[in-house]
Image (cartoon, rainbow, N blue to C red):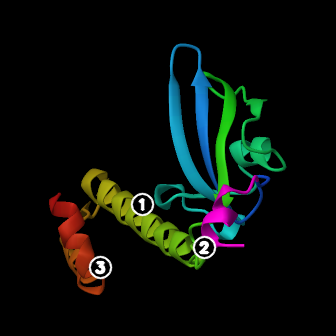
Amino acid sequence: MSAIGDSKKVQKAQIGAHVRVELVYQAETEQLEFDIVADQYADFAHGLLGESTPLAQALIGKITGQAVPYKVGDAQMVKILEVLPGKHTKVENVSARRQEAMRKALEETERTNAIIFASSYSGKWGDYDPSGIEGWEKKDTQSDPGKQERESE
């Protein structure tokens, strides 16, 4: 069968499928499209919906044309408009990227806490000098050149 014929074939929504849906809210509708992927590859900003999300769970096993109750937030139902073979044949394992983002967030939190402490501490031997913390921030931006760009935005 040709590739065109395959794309017209009715398929069930499943891991690896590209799904186009219409979310039906109380007053409006919204169309979305994404590939359903294993959770470790999920990155909704890039069109990859994790299999254990409520939306994926509502869709898995359903076919084009089905309307499924989906009561999340203001949504009432989700209609499956199209199910095709997945568009993302090679997906990146984003768990390493998530871990790095968490590490950076933790470092930023620790740095903020140190600055707050240094700014508010007063002891019997004098105030705490936060001048050393400034070098801490510079050291971090040298190891992450993109940080300076993000901070200037």
Q: Secondary structure at mark 3?
A: helix
Kind of residue indicated by mark 3: Asp
Res. 140 mark: 3
**147 and 125: which is toward the camera:** 147
Q: Is residue 28 above or below residue 140?
A: above
Disc 2 residue type? Ser
Quarter of the figure with the C terminus: bottom left
Pinpoint residue 122: horizontal percent, then vertical percent.
Answer: 28, 54
Question: What main secondary structure does the magenta stretch of the protein show?
Answer: helix
> Toward which corner of the image does residue 127 lie, by quadrant?
bottom left
What distance separates the C-alpha of mark 1 from that of mark 2? 21 Å
Which mark is on residue 147?
Answer: none
- Residue at the far left in the pictured view: 152
Label 2, label 3: how many angstroms apart (C-alpha)? 22 Å
- Say left or right for 55 vs 114: right
Q: Are marks 1 and 2 in contact (CB under 8 Å)?
A: no
Please state which of residues 70 and 81 is positioned toward the viewer in this rendering: 81
What label does residue 109 carry, if any? 1
Visible residue check, residue 146? yes
Q: Earlier in the sequence, mark 2 or mark 3?
A: 2
The magenta segment is 1-10
* C-alpha distance separating marks 3 and 1: 13 Å
Closer to the eye: label 2 or 3: 2
**Quadrant assignment for the N terminus:** bottom right
**Pointer 2: what residue?**
95
Q: Could you tell which of marks 3 and 1 lies nearer the N-terminus?
A: 1
Q: Is residue 83 above or below residue 88?
A: above
Q: Residue at x 55, y 49 (%)?
A: 33
Residue 110 or 25: which is nearer the viewer?
A: 25
Q: Residue at x 67, y 33 (%)?
A: 79
Where does residue 119 sit, x and y in percent of width and height?
A: 25, 54
Q: Secondary structure at mark 1?
A: helix
